[in-house]
Amino acid sequence: MGIGTFVNQPAKSRAAVIRRAKPTNIDLPLLVVAIALAVFGLLMLFSASTDFSLSVYGKPYYMFDKQVLWMIVGTGIAFILARLDYHLWQKYALPLMGATIILLVAVLVNNQVRFGAVRYLIGGSVQPSELAKLAIVVYLSVWLYSKRQFLQNIELGLFPLAIILGMLGGLIYLEPDLSATFTIFILGGLLFFLAGGDLRQIVLFMIVALLAGALVVQLSSTGRSRLGSYITGLKDPLQSTDQVRLSLGAIIRGGLFGVGPGLGTGKWTGLPVAPTDSIFAVVVEELGLLGALTLVGFYGLLLWRGLKIAAKAPDSLGALLAAGLTFWITIEAFINMAVMVGLLPFAGNSLPFISAGGSNLISTLAAIGILLNISRQTNESGPVAEEWRSYGASADLRRRDRRRRVSRARRA
């Protein structure tokens, strides 16, 4: 099929051609990186969780066994999503968001307190705020893709986006889970930017988000405490919170090469929730700076491959999904590691693939499955992908191709 023939077809016909395009092989580097991170995570969790599991659950391998089970479930979900056409999310994004909101409300109604917060269901096995991060990326990608012609209109673009994020963020804030709330707002603004939102609206969104964040911190005793501890720690590291001081101590003991796998002492001597929030400190203590740089390198490779898939996606829906999911995973990783060395206030973010927790692991593996599906549908050599960007997409990762911000269909 020539370019002229493709362009002269109706939009629906062009979309059908894209979906019928023979899928190429999956992105092998991304698959390898995901497997490496999953294996790395299981090994480090085995080392970090035995004492904590014994003291909390009475079984030394309880958390590790649960993580292996969640890994199997998440791998199965990733395999299914890797073969499920990502365009189907246009149909299922709304039910996914509805189910997420129901789960978040159920958390508040259930009022199951664990580690000082109301975030869990089913005996702590399900944490809806983690699932909400995946849901918001999928839903906003579909919503922004469908509204791409109206993003310049504040009443049809920024205002509805603020309502969506405000409703979801408000439910998560009530748990309270400040880190997940801010993560969702960051992802929303980032996706709006990538979809081609007006620059003035994006600046307005950032200003409002910062003011709202400052207000939330002042109204929340948890937020005030964390911010105050963070500022004090910046002035004098010796006055940092116990978690930061113990984490820095573990990192210093690790040195360049680490004390050896399983030989770290920080997890035995008070490092808070070593299998989850503080697991990066365990990694650095046992594997040293080289081990930490290896882990950071894995996340860097994941970021590179995810953005590569976004750049080559068949349409802007695939580009938004790929970029949003990639940024979500890497932002979570950056926040967790930065907190452990005192660069950011304590947030409570999980370290993707590494921290214990079924909800985060399954959500992350589901994101990898969607990324692999987008990579399978990439058609690099034919005119289909480029013509879809020219005539159907609102932006190609913020006007990288120097085309106008909002495209218009060409008359036959």
Image: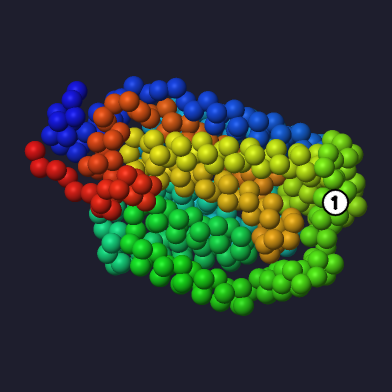
Residue sitting at the far front: 402
Which residue occupies 14% across, 28% down?
Answer: 5
What residue appears at the point 27 percent right and 31 percent down from the top-left corner? 384
Q: Is residue 58 above or below residue 241?
A: above
The answer to whether residue 385 of the structure is visible from this angle is yes
Residue 312 is situated, as x and y percent measured from the top left of the image, at 39, 35
Numbered-mark total: 1
Between residue 236 and residue 77, name the one nearer to us.
Answer: 236
| Figure quadrant of residue 353 | top right
Residue 208's x, y, as percent? 46, 72
Query: 271 or 64, which lies in front?
Result: 271
From where the camera sits, is residue 130 visible? no
Q: On the picture, is 190 further left or further right than 53?
A: left
The answer to which of 317 and 407 lies nearer the viewer is: 407
Give the amino acid at mark 1: Ile
Q: Residue at x 71, y 41 (%)?
A: 293
Q: Position of residue 156 (x, y in %)?
A: 29, 63
In the rendered image, the quadrant that contains the N terminus is top left
Graded by Cα atoms within 10 Å as few (under 14), some (14 to 19) or many (20 or more), the crowding at tag 1 reads some
Secondary structure, mark 1, is helix
Q: Residue at left 52%, top 39%?
A: 304
Q: Is residue 387 left or right of residue 167?
A: left
Image position, residue 202 (x, y; %):
40, 64
What residue occupies the far left of the structure in this picture?
412
Q: Is residue 319 left or right of residue 132?
A: left
The quadrant in which the C terminus is found is top left
Image color mode: rainbow
Residue denoted by label 1: 252
